[in-house]
Image (cartoon, helix red, strand yellow):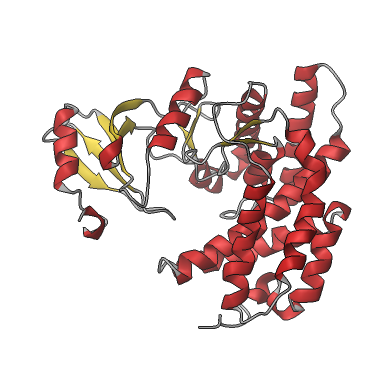
Amino acid sequence: MDLNIPDNALPETGLAFLARAGWAGADIRALPGDASFRRYFRIVKDGGASAMLMHAPPPREDPEPFLRAARWLDDNALRAPVILADDAAQGFVLLEDFGDVRVREYVDAWPDDEAEVYRAAIATLVRLHRLPPGPFTNYGLNEYLREVRLFTDWYCPARGLYIDGRGWTEAWEVVLAPLLARQRPGVTVLRDYHAENIMLIEGLDAQGLLDFQDALVGHPAYDLVSLLQDARRDVAPELEAAMFDHYCQAMAAGIGTAFDTEQFFADYARLGAQRNTKIIGIFVRLWKRDGKPRYLDLIPRVWALLERDLAHPALAPVAAWFDRNIPDELRGSAGVAGGSFAP
């Protein structure tokens, strides 16, 4: 029943949850949604105290992974929002309010601070990666392959392409095999660590984390490439290179031994290509399945990032598959802006 209410309305079950949590009668302000079925509301009491209400309505959403990850992050001195109250069965979570200042909007408005803000985001990753991995599922080969199939399942049919599906899987198996051993015992991977999911809460260095409910245990390059190859804003190649080096230097200083930067960069390219391929498929799925065509406008940026990753020798089998199966006119910006998708 609650799935059919307008995006800016809170169901009666939500009002009852707020009353139980001590927020009855508070002002409820709907916030813009994201790519999921979750909805967010700012809850403000008469005295000015505020909190964030997340509604993750079952069966499409499940707040339990978010709750588990948030508590683990907070227990390890990483700034996830504090859980004030929850009713997971009905999909409600009341959270600490981090305010409105996201890294995305801040650095766009104050570009001179961009490097400092990104260095702070790198520092968060370094702290995360020095911890033992959290209580999350392994980011294994099957999950990597499931994700890249989003490209062949959604993008290719939308473009009317008939492709070599078996060759796609085999190419990725060859490309990903070398890094699998290097992600043991692994680190906690937030999986969506980028400028729109990092909040500035107490100055440039105090950054709060959002959207980590899909956390897994995997390779440290994954969240780094998520941050520096951002699907939603342009990160200059010079800044990407500088922050990559900054991360490697910080990790080397922490472990006190040599850090194999060349090998790590190869894995960074592997996971950049894997992630960007997945994102293209997701953005088309958001349009075709969920009626959210605005994400198509982001695909040219992601294509450009993917092409850069495919140029690394570690991606040779996948790059060859693209050359055989995806015509030049359907790659890069032309892959979206240059023509309409098939119905």
| Residue 299: quarter of image | bottom right
* Numbered marks: total: 0
Viewed as shown, does residue 100 lie left or right of 127? Answer: left
Residue visible at 86% across and 39% down?
A: 263
Residue found farthest to the top: 256
In the rendered structure, the answer to whether residue 201 lies left or right of residue 122 reads left
In the displayed image of the protein, which residue is found farthest to the left?
25
Q: Is residue 35 visible?
A: yes
**Would you say 343 lies left or right of 187 here?**
left
Q: Nearer the viewer, residue 273 or 248?
A: 273
Q: Position of residue 306 (x, y in %)?
A: 72, 59
User: For the N terminus, which image quadrant?
Assistant: bottom left
Q: Is residue 336 visible?
A: no
Pick the front one: 215 or 226: 215
- Residue at 58%, 42% in the rendered image: 191
Q: Quadrant of residue 70?
A: top left
Q: Position of residue 288 (x, y in %)?
A: 47, 71
Residue at the spot 11% in from the left edge and 35% down from the top edge = 25
Quadrant in the rendering for residue 148: bottom right
Is residue 279 positioned above or below 320 on the image?
A: above
